[in-house]
């Protein structure tokens, strides 16, 4: 070997490494204005949720004040039909909506990813069964199906989460399945199998780490969706039970009192801001992590 | 019991739409004894990659049999690969896809060392064999060039202590200036590890450098077989002659390779 | 840098149908990809650009075509037909590209739309750049397919890319590139994805087109065997620079730069077949 000349490879490797490194360098994310706006809004809401008891000007459940007063110095966002301070209720509502959305998204991501990965990797019967179930769920409009399930289970937070989980896992399963099908015939996956890896090892070690990025992006985009769905259920009276402050049910109350615009407007704006913030975050993450995933993730409908 | 790899009239048929079927490998019989370095040449679509996959149990045989050291090679389904078949390892064509991009190369070589029946050489030794700095163990595949990645893939295959290595066009995606070097390196590493090597390529000029025996494949069949120098200097089949004539030679004379215009 | 006398003198006397690249630089985000490339591409000749991956040879071809990445900064000069291409408005480059300067790629199927028939692919160029009628365009398309020696041109027009083999597809993409009668053809690794026997045919075709039509062909390839077969002059690139440039025979038979020497030494023809005893030990 020693007699062979060695054409330098450094040029190529430097170039490759440079390109690859640039793609994964984190600071580039922060050069996107949408990313910054989204993250700041989300961070603010998280802070509000954590410090809610300190921030609420009044007890969100106290009915002491005058009913349906317009925004004023005493009640910045006005009061509702029962004389409760709207600002306090919105702040308190963040403790309900945000954790619920996070739990819901994580649960449906985990459930959907596992089922989708199994369907994609094992194929055949497993694939058919899982995918026909997702088709079944997709065949109904999301909110209607969630409504039916929630109505069957009865109102309450736990049931609302269950109902939403049932309707939101299939999108993860679909994306995961297609990603796994694309990845499972990669040479490194085959090489792993040839080196004696079983199905579980192959899936966990070789396949999943390479397909997880689009799923995370989808999850970020789905946060906003989860909050909307949850608010929707609450709006219909199937989510939280009345005295609990929740944004969706507040909008619902506000709509009934149309002349008191402030109730629905401010709670609606709370929903709007967090949904848009998560969408900004998800979109920017998607662009930065993997431009190719745009098609896989972007093509779904709400 | 026969030593080494034995294919007995092995065929692989793909079912295609509308009842058509495509026989990619058509009744191939061959033997590779232990320690032998055999080249398999042919053009794209001749079935050479399918043959390689069949030897590894990645394709279902439609007829015939493949056995290794007397044990039949079955199709690798969802079960783990049989212990005895772990002795057959493959090196793939695409250096950018043959290593897991999310794992350090040290870990990937370590996985292969675990299945070595004997004392596996240390990772650093393996890397040194393929002329990669031992300090590279903690790096990720994207930090290496195509040629380096292919050598890491070779190190990984050798770490498992194979008795038969299959190189499925391992040099086809590399720069011309690296091809001969990586091919000879693969041969040397395989021979040192005591493994036989089935080297698949479309390039007879490279195969000639490393193989002692050459098989020429066309349309799923082995049409010519013999010692490398005999095939190179005195090909019998018209197809082999044409393959040889078409190889461009870097002699600076501006000679266009000869072709048979009817065949394309 | 061992620059030898190039086949034609540079500067004012250079043929207007060729391309003259001088001091071409290209950087992406502060990284120099091309670092002062000088190249003459006279008509009726095949100018070879050799080098390993990452040497900048493909990027040079792309820059001449005006296809550099969006976030790149291009400097220096590319002169073609009395005009300066560096800094030219996007619209004007679009008009030149396809009509005057055409390009073919390694993967022939990448340059052809999978859902459009061969007739559509060949005539769309013509009708866009030349504004000819449908029937004229069709006649020209048949003529082109004959020129690149695709069997049964009339039948081929009705078919779709997936119905052809790789070699035929490369011929068809050459025909598409030639549709508007360009003066410059940039061929980026045109035969790397093809089998050797098919490669031989495509190389012969390129050589004939160059001789018959007086095309200026830039052949980008890492394969010095291919280079030796068709190129008239060879420029060897490394790290964004041309390290050696000269006539084919001189560069391949008597390389001056150590890098070129190493490239040629690494070819299989320069290494004897294996010593079997060593292999067995």
Image (cartoon, coloured by chain):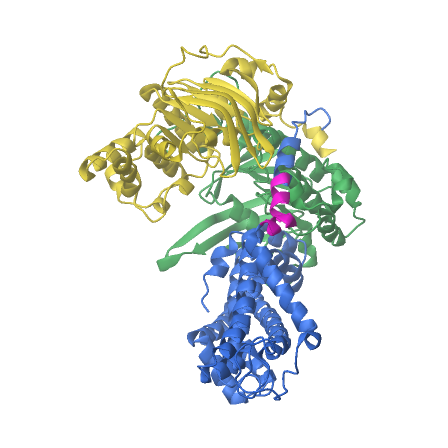
Chain colours: A blue, B green, C yellow
Q: Is residue B45 above or below residue C271?
A: below
**Residue at left 66%, top 81%?**
A58
Residue placed most toward the observer, B199 or A92: A92
Confirm whether residue C230 shows in the render.
no
Task: Name which residue lies at 47% across and 80% down.
Answer: A145
| Vertical side of C7 occupied by B95: above or below | below
| Front one among A58 and C121 | A58
The stretch in magenta equals A18-31
Q: Nearer the viewer, residue C132 or A6?
A: C132
Magenta span dominant secondary structure: helix
Q: Would you place residue A231 above or below residue B238 in this image? A: below
Q: Which of C81/A64 is in front?
A: A64
Examine the rendering and report whether any part of residue B52 can be seen: yes
Is residue A21 one of those drawn in magenta?
A: yes
| Residue B180 magenta | no
Q: Position of residue A94 (x, y in %)?
A: 62, 74
**Residue A139 percent across, percent down from the top left:** 42, 75
Q: Position of residue B132 (x, y in %)?
A: 73, 37
Is residue B37 toward the left or the right of residue A297 in the image? right
- When asked about the image quadrant of residue C198, the answer is top left
């Amino acid at each position: 070997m020693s007699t062979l000349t060695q054409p330098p490879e450094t040029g190529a490797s430097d170039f490759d490494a440079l390109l690859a490194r640039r793609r994964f360098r984190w600071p580039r994310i922060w050069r996107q204005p949408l990313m910054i706006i989204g993250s700041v809004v989300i961070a603010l809401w998280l802070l509000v949720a954590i410090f809610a008891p300190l921030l609420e000007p009044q007890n969100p459940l106290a009915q002491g004040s005058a009913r349906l007063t317009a925004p004023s110095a005493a009640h910045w966002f006005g009061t509702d039909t029962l004389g409760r301070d709207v600002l306090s209720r919105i702040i308190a509502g963040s403790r309900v909506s945000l954790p619920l959305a996070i739990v819901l998204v994580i649960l449906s991501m985990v459930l959907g990813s596992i089922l989708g990965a199994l369907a994609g990797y094992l194929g055949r019967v497993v694939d058919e069964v899982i995918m026909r179930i997702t088709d079944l769920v997709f065949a109904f409009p999301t909110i209607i199906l969630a409504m039916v399930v929630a109505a069957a289970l009865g109102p309450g937070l736990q049931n609302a989460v269950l109902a939403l989980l049932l309707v939101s896992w299939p999108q993860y399963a679909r994306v995961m399945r297609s990603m796994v099908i694309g990845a499972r015939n990669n040479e490194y996956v085959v090489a792993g199998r040839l080196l004696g890896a079983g199905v579980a090892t192959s899936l966990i070690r070789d396949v999943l780490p390479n397909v997880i990025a689009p799923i995370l992006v989808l999850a970020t985009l789905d946060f906003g969706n989860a909050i909307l769905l949850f608010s929707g259920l609450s709006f219909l009276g199937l989510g939280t039970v009345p005295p609990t402050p929740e944004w969706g049910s507040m909008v619902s109350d506000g709509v009934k009192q149309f002349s008191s615009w402030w109730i629905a407007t401010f709670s609606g704006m709370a929903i709007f801001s967090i949904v848009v913030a998560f969408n900004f975050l998800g979109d920017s993450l998607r662009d930065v992590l993997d431009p190719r995933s745009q098609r896989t993730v972007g093509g779904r409908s709400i | 019991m026969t030593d080494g790899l034995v294919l007995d009239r092995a065929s692989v048929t793909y079912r295609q739409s509308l009842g058509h079927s495509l026989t990619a490998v058509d009744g191939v019989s061959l033997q590779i004894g232990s320690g032998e370095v055999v080249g398999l040449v042919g053009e794209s679509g001749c079935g050479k990659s399918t043959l390689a996959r069949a030897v590894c149990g990645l394709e279902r045989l439609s007829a015939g049999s493949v056995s290794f050291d007397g044990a039949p090679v079955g199709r690798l389904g969802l079960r783990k690969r049989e212990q005895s078949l772990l002795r057959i390892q493959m090196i793939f064509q695409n250096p950018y896809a043959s290593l897991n991009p999310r794992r350090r190369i040290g870990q990937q070589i370590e996985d292969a060392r675990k299945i070595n029946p004997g004392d596996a050489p240390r990772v650093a030794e393996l890397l040194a064999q393929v002329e990669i700095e031992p300090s590279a163990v903690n790096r990720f595949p994207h930090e290496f060039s195509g040629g380096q990645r292919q050598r890491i893939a070779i190190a990984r295959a050798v770490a498992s202590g194979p008795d038969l290595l299959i190189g499925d066009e391992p040099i086809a995606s590399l720069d011309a200036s690296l091809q001969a070097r990586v091919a000879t390196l693969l041969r040397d590493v395989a021979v040192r590890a005591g493994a036989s090597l089935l080297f698949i390529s479309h390039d007879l000029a490279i195969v000639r450098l490393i193989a002692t025996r050459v098989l020429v494949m066309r349309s799923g069949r082995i049409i010519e077989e013999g010692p490398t120098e005999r095939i190179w200097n005195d090909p019998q089949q018209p197809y082999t002659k044409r393959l040889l004539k078409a190889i461009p030679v870097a002699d600076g004379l501006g000679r266009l390779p000869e072709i048979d215009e009817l065949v394309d | 840098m061992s620059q030898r006398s190039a086949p034609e003198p540079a500067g004012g006397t250079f043929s207007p149908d060729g391309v003259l690249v001088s001091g071409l630089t290209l950087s992406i985000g502060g990284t120099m990809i091309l670092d002062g490339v000088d190249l003459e591409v006279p008509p009726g000749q095949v100018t070879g650009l050799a080098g390993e991956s990452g040497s900048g040879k493909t990027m040079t071809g792309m820059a001449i075509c005006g296809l550099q990445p969006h976030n790149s900064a291009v400097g220096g000069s590319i002169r073609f037909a009395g005009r300066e291409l560096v800094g030219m408005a996007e619209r004007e480059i679009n008009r030149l590209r396809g009509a005057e300067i055409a390009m073919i790629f390694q993967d022939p199927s990448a340059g052809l739309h999978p859902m459009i028939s061969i007739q559509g692919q060949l005539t769309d160029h013509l009708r866009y750049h030349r504004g000819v009628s449908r029937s004229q365009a069709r006649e020209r398309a048949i003529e082109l397919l004959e020129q690149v020696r695709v069997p049964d041109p009339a039948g081929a027009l009705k078919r779709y890319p997936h119905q052809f083999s790789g070699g035929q597809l490369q011929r068809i993409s050459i025909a598409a590139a030639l549709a508007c009668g360009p003066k410059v053809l940039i061929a980026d690794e045109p035969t790397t994805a093809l089998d050797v026997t098919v490669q031989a045919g495509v190389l012969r075709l390129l050589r004939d087109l160059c001789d018959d039509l007086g095309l200026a062909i830039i052949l980008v390839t890492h394969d010095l065997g291919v280079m030796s077969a068709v190129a008239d002059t060879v420029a060897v690139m490394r790290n964004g620079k041309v390290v050696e440039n000269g006539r084919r025979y001189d560069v391949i038979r008597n390389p001056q730069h150590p890098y070129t020497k190493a490239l040629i030494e690494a070819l299989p023809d320069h290494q004897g077949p294996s010593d079997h005893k060593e292999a067995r030990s």
